[in-house]
Image (cartoon, rainbow, N blue to C red):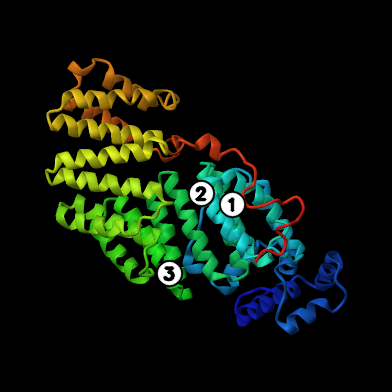
């Protein structure tokens, strides 16, 4: 049955009954006959005030009504919030999910598998997608929106943004049909990151703000806090620093007090805002608090936090210490992301030149030769590195190093190109032997 409030389901039934009877004599009988229901089936559903999503989709399809628009018209227009339709055709997984929902056959795979997949998609998104393609036929119907959100996040990790948007958008529409407001809010958070990866942080902010409103009305304090953290992050990138700080401070009040990825992100971003506003000492305090949220698994977060710490040290004139921290940053990203490694190395070269250490600076710059092969497909960065090294130590000046750093930093603005420089990108996009467990023998059925 539809999982929303019983009053809302009854409203849907009454509106659909009026629509049917407004189609003229014989419309009701024709619908029951075409869909394979016996005489009196519809009246029984109206009297009971309930209907499965599959049955609802069947009736709406027979009447030629768009399910999402019908639900919005009856239950409200969702505050007028509209989402653009993703380009291209939906992937097969999305079509299969809709077919499964219309069929209405329950499954035995529960939330446990989806939680595992949600973690798996960070390191093995192609593998997570393979499992999702199996799970779409076996997961509990109510969990289909969540499954599509996980699949979309995996496609996003592989920089297949159209497929990601289609999957997450379909999940939102299914959650709207079920009046599952909490899941709508969580899926909107995922969709905002797809918009940001397209380079549209203004759109990411708009979607995140709506996600936050939905989650607030659901009473989900933790995910409301996460949505606020997202909003503060996009505000930072839009250079709306004061608004970002205010939003993130509220996020910290809503997030659990225990160290977490979201709490660390909020503290780090507040620190970055204060640094850009010239409040260097305050920035250092927030970065120190963010370090308490670093886990051994989140190496990228640790690297970015060290990087911000190094920049603050440089602002404070502590160049020797900044150089030591930047070397740690280079070491972190050398095996994670070729673009970030190149940019951090350029910053380290600049610091060493400022310290009056030209030989050390050139040795560090020369270490980027190892990045030329993995970066050969990115003409901008590979050319910039070649220009940095072309004239040897004698021609390595602070002005040249700063100019090369700026060129690499500009390339970072193209999120799709930049994410393709992930050191393990080719591996991420290839399905590996499952680390979750065999699926061909049905061993995941009944997972909870």
Rendering quarter of residue 230: bottom left
Q: Is residue 107 left or right of residue 291?
A: right
Q: Which residue appears at 65% of the width and 75% of the height?
A: 12
Q: Label 3 near label 1: C-beta < 8 Å?
A: no
Q: Closest to the observer: 282 or 54?
A: 282
Identify the secondary structure beneath mark 1. helix
- Residue 42's label in the rendered image is none
Query: What quarter of the picture does the N terminus occupy?
Result: bottom right
Q: CA distance from mark 1 to mark 3?
A: 23 Å
N-terminal of the pair, mark 2 or mark 3, is 2
Report which residue position mark 1 lands on: 151
Report which residue position mark 3 lands on: 222
Q: Residues within 10 Å of mark 1 (few under 14, many from 20)?
A: many
Q: Is residue 51 left or right of residue 414?
A: right
Q: Which residue appears at 40% of the width and 47% of the height?
A: 299
Q: Label 2 near label 1: C-beta < 8 Å?
A: no
Residue 269 in percent (x, y) is at: 29, 55
Residue 187 in percent (x, y) is at: 52, 60
Picture layout, residue 112 above or below residue 216: above
N-terminal of the pair, mark 1 or mark 2, is 2
N-terminal of the pair, mark 1 or mark 3, is 1
Q: Is residue 374 visible?
A: yes
Q: Is residue 45 left or right of residue 437?
A: right
Q: Residues within 10 Å of mark 2 (few under 14, many from 20)?
A: some
């Amino acid at each position: 049955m539809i999982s929303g409030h019983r009053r809302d389901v009854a409203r849907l039934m009454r509106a659909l009954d009026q629509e049917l009877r407004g189609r003229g004599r014989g419309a009701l009988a024709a619908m029951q006959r075409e869909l394979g229901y016996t005489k009196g089936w519809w009246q029984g559903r109206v009297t009971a005030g309930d209907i499965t999503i599959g049955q609802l989709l069947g009736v709406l399809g027979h009447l030629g009504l768009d399910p999402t628009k019908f639900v919005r018209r009856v239950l409200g227009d969702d505050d007028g919030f509209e989402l653009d339709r993703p380009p291209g055709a939906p992937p097969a997984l999305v079509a299969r999910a809709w077919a499964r929902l219309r069929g209405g056959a329950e499954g035995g795979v529960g939330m446990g598998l989806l939680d595992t997949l949600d973690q798996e998609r960070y390191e093995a998104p192609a593998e997570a997608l393979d499992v999702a393609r199996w799970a779409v036929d076996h997961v509990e119907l109510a969990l289909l929106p969540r499954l599509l959100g996980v699949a979309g996040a995996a496609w996003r990790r592989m920089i297949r943004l159209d497929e990601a948007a289609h999957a997450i958008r379909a999940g939102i529409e299914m959650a709207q049909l079920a009046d599952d407001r909490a899941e709508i809010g969580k899926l909107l958070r995922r969709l905002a990151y797809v918009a940001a990866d397209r380079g549209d942080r203004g759109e990411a902010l708009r979607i995140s703000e709506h996600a936050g409103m939905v989650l607030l009305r659901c009473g989900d304090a933790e995910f409301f806090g996460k949505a606020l953290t997202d909003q503060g992050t996009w505000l930072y990138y839009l250079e709306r620093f004061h608004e970002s700080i205010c939003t993130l401070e509220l996020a910290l009040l809503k997030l659990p007090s225990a160290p977490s990825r979201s709490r660390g992100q909020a503290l780090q971003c507040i620190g970055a805002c204060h640094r850009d506003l010239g409040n260097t000492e305050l920035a250092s305090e927030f970065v120190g608090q963010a370090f308490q949220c670093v886990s051994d698994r989140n190496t990228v977060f640790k690297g970015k936090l060290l990087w911000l710490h190094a920049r603050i040290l440089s602002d404070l004139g502590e160049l020797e210490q900044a150089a030591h921290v930047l070397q740690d940053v280079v070491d972190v990203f050398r095996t994670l992301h070729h673009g970030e490694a190149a940019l951090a190395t350029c910053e380290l070269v600049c610091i060493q030149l400022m310290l009056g250490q030209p030989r050390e600076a050139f040795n560090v710059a020369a270490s980027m030769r190892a990045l030329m092969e993995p970066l050969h497909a990115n003409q901008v960065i590979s050319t910039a590195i070649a220009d940095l090294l072309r004239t040897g130590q004698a021609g390595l000046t602070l002005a040249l190093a700063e100019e090369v750093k700026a060129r690499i930093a500009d390339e970072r603005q193209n999120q799709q190109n930049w994410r393709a420089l992930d050191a393990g990108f080719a591996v991420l996009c290839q399905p590996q032997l499952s680390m979750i467990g065999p699926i061909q023998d049905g061993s995941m059925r009944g997972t909870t």
